[in-house]
Amino acid sequence: MTNAESPTVLCRKLANFDCEQLDSVRRELYKSEPSRLKQSWLPVPQEEFEPGLVYTGWKNSDFFVFAELPDADIFTFAKDPGDRLWRLGDTFEIFLGRPDQEAYYEFHVAPNNLTLQLHFPNSQAAEWAGRTQRFEELMMNGDAFVSQTWIKPETKRWFVLGRISGRLLETSGELAGARWSFSFCRYDYTRGEEVPVISSTSPHAKADFHRRQEWGTICFE
């Protein structure tokens, strides 16, 4: 168990960059201070743990998340959008909400760029979904969340760029001066191992990514 404080991130305004070109994304997003994936609920990290980095920024009415994920075995068995990606292989997750609202969002991305988008109206909905394993009513469609992935097996890394419309959380879409709650998380699978190695940027006292009281805060400059 940890007593670490939840992180606060200053989200900087981004210059123009090409979302489809990894080098362009890296040049611009690497200017931001990264959040680090950890295993705060453990006394010491697992031997297999790979400490990924997550960078953020915003432009116009869009919020960007860029993750660099070291991974010795990059794979997913997911075939379709909306698959339960966290059960099928490597998955990067983005949790976002507003501190003054119960509702929050959860976005999943697999290495093959398949996605899962969920909207939880409150914590009770998350508890119900976890208990019943019924997520269909919480799934979202549309282009409010868009992602791009790059797999680099030669360097044992994969990368995720996620773009989230600010209008999901802000009525006007204006992000300057906004404050959001966030958590970035990961399922790192290795073929032949039944249980994935999980990690989060939040200092969770136990391995439950939905513990919002331990999420961090994003402050949009």
Image: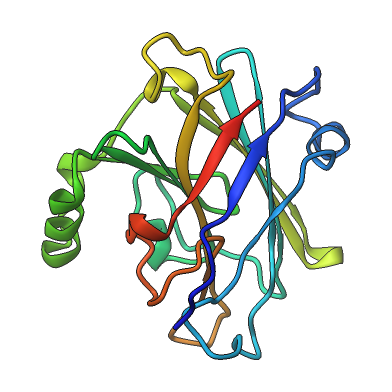
Residue 106 lies left or right of residue 138; in this view the side is: right
Q: Is residue 6 above or below residue 146?
A: below
Residue 192 lies left or right of residue 12; in this view the side is: left
Q: Give the residue drawn at x 62%, y 12%.
A: 60
Residue 93 in view in this figure: no
Q: Position of residue 146 (x, y in %)?
A: 53, 30
Q: Is residue 130 above or below residue 123?
A: below
The quadrant the N terminus occupies is bottom left
Q: Position of residue 150 (x, y in %)?
A: 72, 47
Q: Give the residue drawn at x 81%, y 32%.
A: 21
**Front residue of this view, candidates 142 and 198:** 198
Q: Give the residue drawn at x 65%, y 91%.
A: 47
Q: How many marks?
A: 0
**Front residue of this view, candidates 173 and 108:** 173
**Front residue of this view, candidates 64 and 18:** 64
Q: Position of residue 101 (x, y in %)?
A: 27, 34
Q: Give the residue drawn at x 60%, y 71%.
A: 38
Q: Is residue 176 above or below residue 127?
A: above
The quadrant the C terminus occupies is top right
Q: Residue lying farthest top?
A: 172
Q: Position of residue 44 (x, y in %)?
A: 60, 90
